[in-house]
């Protein structure tokens, strides 16, 4: 897959260790709630909120997610954290980016836009084993975990396929700043500040298909 033309802030090491701890805790939830192995909520036209350019917008999901199956993944969804896709769902050298903001602390306010493994036409599970070795963790322990609760920041008000990248938020102050700013520019300013509580982004092989339909 061709890289986006935008420069992205570098991933910080602290994010990986915190994210893996969160997802280990969620693994048990996934095994109980989704024992059937289903990996999508098949709801065409379902909507969620997202933040874009300082506003809260509505996005509509007319079809399900795509994860590049040429990237090995042990999750039923085929989705993988820690590497970009080799190919996307369509030919496009400069796809829009959806940043998935994952709160890594208790009781974030405002509440995440998506609860654990709940958003329509998202995967319900994802594989973290690609990053386990660097952390000294067992790959088997994180081969398939529930998709964490999260909110969305868009890099514009486009439509179609969106390249998903994960950004971790480690404290309420940072989460509140993101909720107040509601924009990629505010997120990037926090990413550039040491110890801001906002770290990432980390690549995935996941794409979501949605259109911005309301402000």
Image: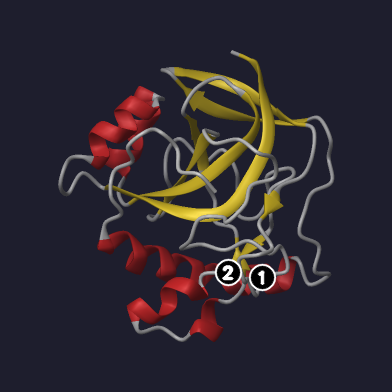
Kindly identify which numbered label has been placed on residue 127.
Answer: 2
Q: Where is residue 81 in the image (x, y as percent from the top left)?
A: 51, 62
Question: Depth check: 179 or 203 in front?
Answer: 203
Say which residue appears at 65% left-offset and 63% top-offset: 125
Kindly identify which numbered label has been placed on residue 46.
Answer: none
Answer few, some or many: residues within 10 Å of disc 1's Cα (few below 14, many 20 plus, some between 14 and 19).
many
- Count of marks placed on residues: 2
| Left or right: 11, with 29 as reference point | left
Element type at marker 2? loop
Q: Are marks 2 and 1 in contact (CB under 8 Å)?
A: yes
Say which residue appears at 56% left-offset and 38% top-offset: 113
Label 1, on which residue? 75
The CA distance from mark 2 to mark 1 is 5 Å
The image quarter in which residue 62 lies? top right
Q: Residue furthest top?
A: 215
In the rendered structure, which disc, 2 or 1, sits on the residue that comes first in sequence?
A: 1
Look at the picture and state if 209 lies above or below 170.
above
Q: Position of residue 200 (x, y in %)?
A: 34, 50
Answer few, some or many: residues within 10 Å of disc 2's Cα (few below 14, many 20 plus, some between 14 and 19).
many
Q: Which residue lies furthest to the left in this view?
A: 194
Look at the picture and state if 91 lies above or below 85.
above
Say which residue appears at 77% left-offset and 44% top-offset: 64
Question: Depth check: 19 or 200 in front?
Answer: 200
């Amino acid at each position: 897959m061709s890289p986006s033309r935008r420069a992205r802030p570098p991933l910080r090491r602290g994010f990986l260790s915190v994210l893996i701890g969160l997802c280990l805790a969620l693994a048990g939830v996934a095994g109980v709630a989704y024992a059937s192995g289903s990996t999508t909520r098949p709801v065409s036209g379902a909507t969620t909120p997202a933040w874009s350019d300082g506003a809260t917008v509505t996005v509509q999901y007319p079809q399900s997610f795509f994860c590049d199956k040429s990237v090995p993944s042990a999750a039923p969804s085929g989705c993988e954290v820690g590497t970009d896709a080799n190919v996307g769902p369509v030919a496009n050298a400069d796809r829009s980016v959806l940043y998935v903001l994952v709160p890594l602390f208790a009781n974030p306010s405002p509440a995440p836009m998506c609860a654990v493994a709940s958003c329509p036409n998202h995967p319900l599970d994802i594989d973290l084993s690609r990053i386990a070795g660097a952390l000294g963790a067992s790959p088997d322990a994180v081969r398939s975990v529930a998709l964490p609760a999260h909110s969305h920041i868009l890099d514009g008000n486009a439509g179609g396929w969106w390249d998903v990248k994960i950004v971790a938020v480690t404290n309420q102050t940072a989460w509140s700043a993101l909720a107040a700013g509601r924009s990629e520019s505010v997120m990037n300013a926090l990413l550039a500040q040491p110890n801001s509580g906002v770290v990432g982004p980390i690549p995935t092989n996941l794409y979501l298909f949605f259109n911005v339909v309301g402000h």
